[in-house]
Image: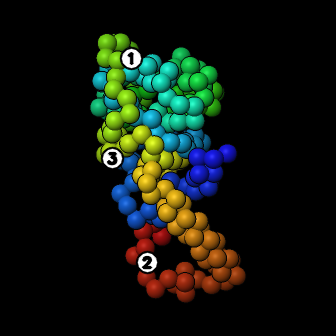
Amino acid sequence: MSTHDLARGHSSATLSEASGLSVALAPEIRSLWAGARLCGPAFTVQGAGGDNLALHHAVLRAPAGSVLVADLGGARFGHWGEILTVAAQRRGIAGLLIDGGVRDAAETEALGFPVFSRNNAILGTRKDFPGVFGRPVGVGGLIIRTGDLVVGDVDGVVALPASDTERILGRADARVAHENELMRQLRAGRSTLDLYDNFETAGR
């Protein structure tokens, strides 16, 4: 399994709250298809809006199990589609997180490949800029570095700093255990007012 046991099955929301850090990407970054889940170490790609040559090179460069994390400047072009999806799956890539547009949503869903993007767009792209790899990139309002742990689901995407991932996962484990106990008490008849001093806790 690894990749920290696929982030121990924690949701993006749990990881965000457990981190105590600004790790949540902008809510405009969403899954291309319902039910997609993204989890893996980032392999960063700096591309150019309206140009997808960098993504073709990234598919060949990225280690198996990694998530391509690409800065395309939020551009509304179809930078990624069915052909790159098939190529990425053949290389063992775990998914794509892109600040830019993608297309071929139905085909990508049928292939089961997780893609999280800024937008969906059908405009075609040129192939001029070969890209820059392994450097920090800006995606969804965060700076993400190669090796950071990326987790995405229906609620959104988080990027956990590689140096702090174990601490965050430990706090997430503890948070889930605590919430499970709260759920047990609620089902036994306790009220939320019994269990919380106030309602200022985020997300409650």
Q: Which colour scheme is used?
A: rainbow
- Frontmost of labels 3 and 2 is 3
> Residue 142 has which mark?
3
Residue beneath label 2, please?
A: 199
- The picture places residue 108, in percent across and down from the top left corner, at 57, 26
Asked if residue 81 shows in the view, the reply is no
Element class at badge 1:
helix
Between the residue at mark 1 and the residue at mark 2, the CA separation in whole angstroms equals: 49 Å
Tally the numbered discs: 3
Q: What residue type is labelled 1?
A: Leu
Observer-nearest of 85 and 200: 85
Residue beneath label 1, please?
A: 53
Residue ID at (49%, 63%):
167
Q: What residue type is labelled 3?
A: Leu
Above or below: residue 141 compared with residue 54: below
Q: In which quarter of the image is the N terminus?
A: top right
- Frontmost of labels 1 and 2 is 1
Q: Which amino acid does label 2 sit on?
A: Phe
Quarter of the view holding residue 178: bottom right
- The picture places residue 26, in percent across and down from the top left corner, at 36, 47
> Residue 74 has which mark?
none
Observer-nearest of 57 and 140: 57
Taking the image as shown, residue 188 lies to the left or right of residue 16, namely: right
Element class at badge 2:
loop
Observer-nearest of 141 and 118: 141
Element class at badge 3:
strand
Circle nearer the N terminus (1, 3):
1
